[in-house]
Amino acid sequence: MDKYLKTKDQKDFPATFRKQAREQVDFLPDSSFTSIDATKLIFQSKNSQTLCEYHRKGKATSYRADTVLQLHGTGFAGRSVKESENVRPAEAGHLHCGCSIQEVALEFFLWKTTRAQSSNPNLANRTFEMEELQKLKPSTRAFWNKSLRDYTGLQTEDFISSDYGSTTYATRIALIQLHAQIERLRALKAPVVVQVVFPDADNRDIPGDLILYADESGMFVTAKQLEQYWNDLKVNRKVSPLPFSATPSRKEY
């Protein structure tokens, strides 16, 4: 994986390893949060065809494009071929199966990184991984991903980052969600006043080499850097109120 990231040569990330990463949840978790381009490569077969696992394991009849009446979870009618010379370029932003790269990448990230616990008190200290990915329908994926984005304000690109697992990553995720909720309150005209202030840091207490490292790596170790990131969020983020479903009145029944 490290070699591929340096060379960007697909030969350094063999199809055998890509297949194992797709099918084994605990194998090469880095493949799910390095970059969206790396995730796209994970779903590329030996014949240079990109398919999500549902369509790779499914039937040809499942390659249905979205319509005005039904959301299948695939923007375009997908196709699968056996020979490399018959593979045509996929639609922009999509895999050859018609699924959105953004949707597949977020699903893959959640599958690789999410752990759950049982409500059984005898298993209180045990965490579980999701074993199967192949059976998640694209339409289900679309609704789940949309719900996650709506409630958190996070986008696929926010989750997938090479600094995953670091304090920097956790801080950035928390700031994005805080910004989303504040902007949502303002959009709802809620009677609250929220002001986010980052007190000036006393740089005299921070070693010079650490400040230099922070500037080079983007580590949020000073209030100034936090404030700069917050200001960037205010410029680039558009947050809307939650899309509540309309509840019909009794007269409408």
Image: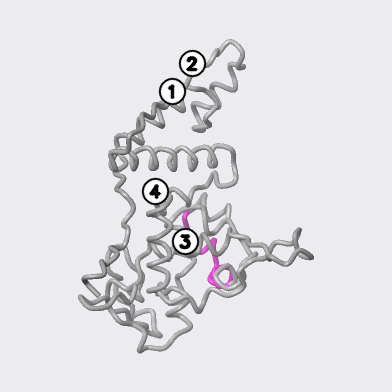
State the residue position of label 1. 197
Task: Tell me residue 7's x, y (percent).
Answer: 50, 52
Whichever of callouts 4 and 2 sits on the residue coming sooner in the sequence is 4
State the residue position of label 4. 153
The quarter of the picture where residue 239 lies is: top left
Label 2 crowding class (10 Å Cα cut-off): few <14, some 14-19, many 20+? few
Residue placed most toward the observer, 140 or 207: 140
Q: Is residue 187 magenta?
A: no
Cα distance between the residues tagged 1 and 4: 21 Å
Please name the predominant secondary structure of the magenta segment in the image: helix
State the residue position of label 2. 200
Residue placed most toward the observer, 240 or 234: 240
The quarter of the picture where residue 76 lies is: bottom left
Cα distance between the residues tagged 1 and 3: 37 Å
Position of residue 212 relative to residue 4, above or below, is above
Whichever of callouts 1 and 4 sits on the residue coming sooner in the sequence is 4
Q: Is residue 12 magenta?
A: yes
